[in-house]
């Protein structure tokens, strides 16, 4: 069986085909939340080791881009992924509607401001892909402008990679029924009302259209240097296992190392 990484990869030059991907897919993992959580915890421990090496080396960074429709689990995925890592070496940014200042610049300007510095792991909870998909669904740009923005993103991400940033782009693929259940739970639970507003219910009416637009954007921007991964998100434990193993695999590929010993410490005795 293909590895988890290969199963969720959108091969550069191919189409994402979201409609053919099963949001509840187990990807060959043993069924069971308890075993899944245990595997995710082991992966998180390994990620913490690699993050320390990345931070100590200070030459490269990891940018994790999380995209998905409402209730796909971006917040939970971020929380689970970064559990146990040193918070000093991580940054999390989310992108809402652009401010008046941001609108006076090109759409990537606000993104470049918060690209993770060398030595750190950065997570984008929503990202520059909102400025391709969401704005197109709202009628703020047309298909031609969306294509132009995808080309600009490819060039931007190529530049980041050339400068030492590893980019891990993950689409949390949620079924329409699971989204309905999660949104209903938020409606029924007063302690979760802060997570949504009534506009989320309006956005849900465009579920199929948004998935089609994401399919196009993902297909156009899954490159050799910054490929996309489509993670089944109906089962939260599957989402967490796959995301953690993708992050670990990305860091193991670049193999960060501690800097060489400092010769100035030779013979030093602390009294």
Image (spheres, helix red, strand yellow):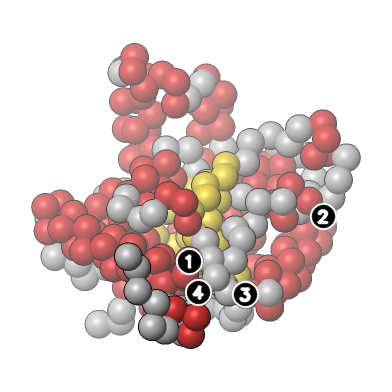
The answer to which of marks 2 and 1 sits earlier in the sequence is: 1
Viewer-side label of 2, 1: 1
Q: Nearer the viewer, mark 3 or mark 1?
A: 1
The image position of residue 93, as x and y in percent, is 57, 45
Residue in the image at 74% along x and 47% along y: 110
Residue 167 x/y as whole percent: 56, 68
Q: Say if residue 131 shows up in the picture.
A: yes
**Disc 1 vs disc 4: Cβ atoms closer than 8 Å?**
yes
* Disc 1, SS: helix
**Label 3 Cα neighbours within 10 Å, binned few <14 / some 14-19 / many ≥20:** some
Between circles 2 and 4, the one closer to the viewer is 4
Q: Distance between the residues labelled 3 and 2?
A: 29 Å
Q: Mark 2 points at which residue?
A: 145
Which callout, 3 or 1, points at the residue further toward the start of the chain?
1
Disc 3 secondary structure class: loop
Task: Name the residue carrying label 4.
Answer: 57
Q: Is the residue under label 1 in contact with that under label 2 (CB below 8 Å)?
A: no
- Disc assigned to residue 164: 3
Residue position marked by numbered label 1 in the rendering: 55
Q: Distance between the residues labelled 3 and 1?
A: 13 Å
């Amino acid at each position: 069986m293909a590895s988890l990484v290969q199963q969720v990869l959108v091969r550069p030059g191919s189409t994402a085909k979201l409609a053919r991907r099963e949001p509840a897919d187990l990807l060959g993992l043993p069924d069971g939340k308890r075993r899944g959580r245990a595997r995710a915890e082991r992966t998180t421990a390994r990620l913490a080791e690699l993050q320390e090496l990345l931070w100590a080396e200070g030459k490269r960074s990891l940018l994790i881009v999380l995209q998905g429709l409402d209730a796909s689990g971006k917040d939970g995925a971020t929380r689970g992924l970064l559990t146990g890592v040193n918070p000093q070496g991580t940054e999390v940014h989310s992108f809402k509607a652009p401010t008046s200042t941001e609108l006076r610049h090109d759409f990537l300007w606000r993104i470049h401001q918060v690209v993770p510095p060398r030595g750190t792991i950065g997570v984008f909870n929503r990202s520059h892909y909102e400025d391709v998909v969401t704005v197109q669904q709202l009628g703020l740009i047309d298909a031609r402008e969306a294509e132009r923005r995808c080309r600009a993103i490819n060039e931007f991400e190529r530049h980041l990679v050339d400068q030492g940033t590893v980019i891990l782009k993950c689409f949390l693929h949620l079924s329409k029924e699971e989204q309905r259940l999660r949104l209903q739970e938020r409606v029924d639970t007063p302690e979760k009302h802060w997570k949504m507003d009534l506009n989320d219910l309006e956005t849900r009416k465009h579920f199929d259209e948004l998935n089609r637009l994401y399919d196009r954007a993902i297909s156009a921007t899954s490159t050799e240097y910054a490929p996309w991964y489509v993670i089944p998100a109906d089962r939260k434990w599957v989402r967490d296992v796959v995301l953690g193993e993708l992050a670990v695999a990305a860091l193991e590929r670049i193999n960060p190392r501690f800097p060489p010993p400092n010769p100035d410490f030779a013979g030093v005795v602390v009294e």
